[in-house]
Amino acid sequence: MIRILIGDDHAIVRQGLRQVLALMPELEVVGEAKNGWEVIEQVRAASPSLLLLDMNMPGPSGVELIKRIREEAPRLPILVLSMHGESQIAGRAIKAGAAGYLTKDSEPETLIHAIRQVASGAHYIEPAVAERLLFQPSPRESAALHTALSDREHQVFLMLVQGRGVTEIGEALHLSAKTVSTHKARLMRKLGVNNLSDLVRYALNHDLV
């Protein structure tokens, strides 16, 4: 039996995943979490054998959350189910310790296959993402300014464009507001933007939100 913990901040997504996974007798959903803190709590409480994780949630999320889970439960395989098909985001997730990555527009059969692969100790990356990641990143992706951001800057960037303030980001990432402000200033300089509106526009133009 593969015991699955679902981490996603959208109730309708969690419910949909439950319905898909219920079709397979060897899969059991043992918990749900709607933010990063609940993911960490449920990893401790529910003892899942696989974590199905969204990249963008309230609280610690993305690369930061993957790293925390790897510290908390080093042997727990993490399968990222994300809205982002960009190879650079997938690469950050895999480098942080995720065992698999696929996008939310994947077919249910692909999701089931990925879960089985990752739960068995193997790895799975959606073929289209893997091709861009390993062989032919698109000119748009390889030349994009955000590829030069550090993992921490990238995390702060995504949280900023989600509408979170400096203080909230600091609390989620256990950083001071001053440190977050420093990351904000550096990433905006690297992206060549002067204000939050331009930052959001950049994210939209590169399919990051």
Image (cartoon, grey):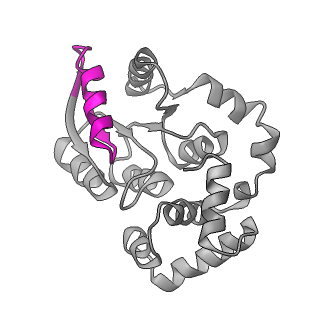
The answer to whether 5 is drawn above or below residue 44 in the figure is above
Assess whether residue 21 is covered by the magenta stretch: yes
Q: State which quarter of the image contains the N terminus.
A: top left
The percent coordinates of residue 82 (x first, y second) are 48, 39
* Front position in the image: 94 or 8: 8
Viewed as shown, does residue 179 lie left or right of 44? right
Total numbered labels: 0
* Front position in the image: 57 or 29: 57
Assess whether residue 128 is covered by the magenta stretch: no
The percent coordinates of residue 205 (x first, y second) are 68, 50
Residue 90 location, quadrant: top right
The percent coordinates of residue 163 (x first, y second) are 46, 65
The answer to whether 123 is drawn above or below residue 144 in the figure is above
Residue depicted at 36% across the width and 58% down the height: 58
The answer to whether 66 is drawn above or below residue 16 in the figure is below
Viewed as shown, does residue 137 lie left or right of 35? right
Residue depicted at 69% across the width and 35% down the height: 133
Residue depicted at 35% across the width and 40% down the height: 76
The percent coordinates of residue 113 (x first, y second) are 43, 17
The span shown in magenta is: 1-28
Residue 152 location, quadrant: bottom right
Residue depicted at 33% across the width and 55% down the height: 36
